[in-house]
Amino acid sequence: MSADPPIFPDLRMLSTIDQVGVEERAQRFQARSIKSESKLSALKLAVTMLDVTTLEGKDSPGKVKQLCAKAKRPLPEDPSIGPAAAICVYPRLVRVAKEAVGRSGVKVASVATGFPSGQSRLKERLSEIRYAVGAGADEIDMVISRGKLLHGEFRSIFDEIVRCKEACGGAHLKVILETGELQTYDTVRIASEIAMAAGADFIKTSTGKIQPAATLPVTLVMLEAIQDYYDRTGRMVGMKPAGGISDAKTAIHYLVMLKETLGKEWLTSRWFRFGASSLTNDLLMQIRKQQTGRYQSADYFTKD
Amino acid sequence: MAAKNRLAVNKTYKLYLGGKFPRTESGRYYEVKGRKGALLANASRASRKDFRNGVVAARKAWPGWDGSSAYLRGQILYRIAEMLEGRTEQFEEELRIQGSTPSTAKKEVAKAVDLLVHYAGWSDKYQSLFSSVNPVSTPHFNFSVPEPTGVVAVAAPEKSSLLGLCSAIAPILAGGNTSIVLASHSKPLCAITLAEVLNSSDVPAGVVNMLTGFRDELLPHFAEHMDVNALLLCSDMEEEAKMVGKRAAENLKRVVSHPDSALEEDPYHILDFQEVKTTWHPVGV
Amino acid sequence: MSEAQDKGAAGSKTKSASSGKKKSRHDFVDGDRYAPAPESSEHVVVKDSYDLFIGGDWIRAPKRTETRNPATGEVLSEVGEAGPGMVKKAVAAARKAYEETWSTMPGRERGKYLYRLARLIQERAREFAVLETMDGGKPIRESRDVDLPLVAAHFFYYAGWADKLDYAFPGRTAHSIGVIGQVIPWNFPLLMAAWKLAPALACGNTVVLKPAETTPLTALKLAELIEEAGFPPGVVNVVTGGGKTGRHLVRHPDVDKVAFTGSTEVGKMIQRDLAGTGRRYTLELGGKAANIIFDDATVNQAVEGIVNGIFFNQGHVCCAGSRLFVQEGIADTVVRKLKRRMDNLVLGDPLDKNTDVGAINSQEQLDRIKVLVDSGSEEGAKCWQSGQKLPRKGFWFKPTIFTECAQSHQIVQKEIFGPVLAIQTFRTPEEAVEKANNTPYGLSGGVWTDKGSKIFKITSQIRAGVLWANTFNKFDPASPFGGYKESGVGREGGLQGLAPYLDLR
């Protein structure tokens, strides 16, 4: 990591986003037809990119342990599938998760900073990050203050992210923009730019608590931001669409988009994640379908 | 025609090019004769090069004329009508000596004035009539508007030397084009007098360029010139139309044919010298 | 730690995906292409041989020519070559149908025939799309998602005009013209047939249509559909053949109007042929559109617009954005992004659903492209081609761009009609407009800027019939299309597209 202090980006240099153009382009990725071997390898790749997520009021150590088991070995009879990239939980459950994933390589990610609204004082948000990291979190998924962003307080957002990044220490920081609240692609682009300049390791679309969550076009806008940032600085930033991606077909569209924008280097769990809960089983079902040629039933896949 | 004790000052009929009244560069002339064979004037016999100069002037004038507001073009057309009305007697006289009866001459001048007033009003209205917003199925705003074709060469009616001439020029001007006009060969006097009217009516230099001369000599060049965008041919001769059409194809000139008579008052004559431009733009936030 | 883990995951994935063999080319991450996803052509019925469709009958022409799939070189079918006698017969059939049925039929009823045809096309759209791709080489994604939907939409659109013609032109009453001779090109074979037929028929005219020599099959299949829809015999006649057949049709004295889409050269010939006859014509001809990117443009979408502008249908598009003007400050960025995007284009089997760039339509066209591309390099422009591998059989050309182009280069002046883009830079709006207009053509143009007032200024200054601002290559039946200057005469599409098929009194 470079020691240079983060510099606030020159937002005047950003080009605007044309909504119709972006949505048209996103649709083109959906027109790709991914078959046979390409499909199977894409499905398997998708499983390794999963941030298996549970973020509910009723979450308990038991539930988290079950999910960790699933993340470690998604398809019990086939060890070549998975493991998932991470398990994503609330800070209080980090310790449980960390213990449950053990040395499997599955990371533990924790949401923090007053998730999902981000409406608590910076001091509290920072201490939440420190708490989660202290409990063993490998990754922190923070939310930004959307109210401030929409109000034009870009500098303040930037400073907050810089502080959060500092609080993370060695943990990776994913910055959730909550694109569904930002309304326009231009704002998404500005938020992406600020987050990356402030040191985000990943930029992430959504909390999953607001509709719309991740969409192909909004993800495309963020992928383009990552590409432009990389072209400018040489630093790779990861991407995590989250929420609303519930079937394998959609996941493959995302991967096609990733492959055809950022390219092969980003096609790993190091640089791309799916934030999802119900996607896992559909990926598994589709993998089985590809392997056997038979359409599958949900009864044959574990629900965790 | 000389009055007692005073020698009349005769008018020299020259060409009208780029807002000036030069003689033909060729130095040639032809005799214009009246009803009983009396010599009325020596008209300039324009050459290919005069025509070329006219095209240069028209091309140069076009961006300004096209760029002027429709309202202004309407005012200028109305101004032409005013000036023409003010010189009614002179035009009537010219028509008479070239063969019209006093009453037809009177009618023709009046009609010419009224026609100009009519087109003055069209200059800011035909766009609304011929434009459209098109309901495309994609999220785009899509609209079509008429734009002037550009530089138009005109072979004016031979028989109707004033009204025919005005009826040929007015829709072209109202539509934002500039022109090079070949006036009636046998009755060229009104054309040059009209040029004087134009010159004193705030019509910018080069917007109308007036030639007198021989049709069979000049028309092939009208049709062939690569910087002329369209051609109005007022003619009853099929052979002429054929010759013009064939030569005009080299730069795909728009060729509009009309019989050898005055053009009706009709906004579709404006449309004849317009191109429809369609513009698309996405609709989004 | 994370890197080690990633390597492990990648390693195991590759192993399982290739089941012990060498890395597969279809692996999602490591492969150089997606696994084949061919559109099925099983349901497409192509007869060994097609006759001419004249007066509702299928008439055998003594002379016959083969039509091939340009992506494989295989012979698809054999079609008749109509000589003067056959053309005469077709015009006579159209005249008879015009006088006896079509011109006297109420507009409402004519409209219903067109609606019915539109529906039949929708029902069999996939079959037509596959055939269009097989006969012409364009990607199935385009024939399926662009051509066919537009074909059906065009018939729907003009069907609705058939009984409303007197409302279209204020102060005028609308009357049909008579027999229309229509000659169409090979780049959008069925779509151009629709563009021509729909307004002509809606206005009460009858038609003799001549499809292009290399792509006659979908027009012939459309004739079958017209038969199936129960159109009166002779309302639509289809005569196949080459340029000679077209010339016979254009020169036939009983053809009241000629509608042609094709090269400017042939367009001029038609204008000469019809000079002084009083017979009408509309011409949709060549183009060399300028696509202008200002430094305040929405860059990523502009790059997409550039790609769509020049690589859509392999650049076999008269309105293709074949000249790119980029403002100096962003030229490097745009070219870098463009190259990256071009490398992601999928080139190959046109029937594969993932193909972005299909086959060049014919050997002749391929040769023409090669000659012009060679001239580009010789004259000093810098050539760059994307990295796709070309199939061995068939006619192919890599997506190509030239930088450092000068206005005087042939690749800047001449219509290439292939996937070849000439890039120039500019400094001021005035310079961009001046260079954009510095061409005998005037069909289309593109302008990319975020500033609204600049859009209106620049689009009004470009002398072309279709201006795409912050988009490119969009088409719609409601939107008039056609060129200024040497790009043609008249408009097709929309209300304005009715005028060429009507006698307005």
Image: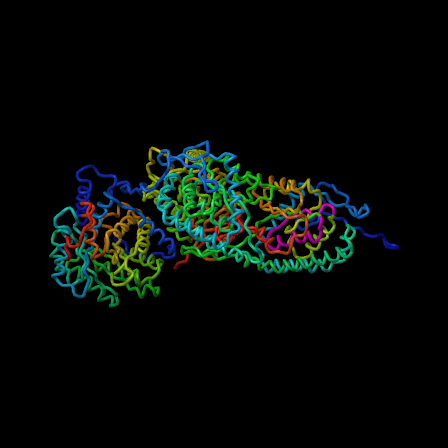
Which residue occupies 11% across, 56% down?
A100
Residue C415 covered by magenta stretch: no
* Above or below B165: residue B225: above
Display colour scheme: rainbow
Q: Residue B141, position in %: x, y? A: 44, 57
Residue C269 in view here: yes
On the rendered structure, is C352 left or right of A49?
Answer: right
Q: Residue C314, position in %: x, y? A: 40, 41
Q: Residue C287, position in %: x, y? A: 48, 43
> Over which residues does the magenta segment extend?
B159-186
In the picture as drawn, the residue positioned furthest to the top comes out as: C63
In the picture as drawn, the residue positioned furthest to the right comes out as: B5
* Above or below C64: residue C33: below
Relative to the observer, which residue lies in front, A173 or A77?
A: A77
In the picture as drawn, the residue positioned furthest to the front comes out as: C100
Residue C288 in view here: no
Which residue occupies 20% across, 40% down?
C18
On the rendered structure, is C337 left or right of C17?
Answer: right
Relative to the observer, which residue lies in front, C391 or C481?
A: C481
Q: How many marks?
A: 0
Relative to the observer, which residue lies in front, B164 or A221?
A: B164
Q: Quadrant of the C terminus of chain B?
A: bottom left
Q: Residue C452, position in %: x, y? A: 46, 57
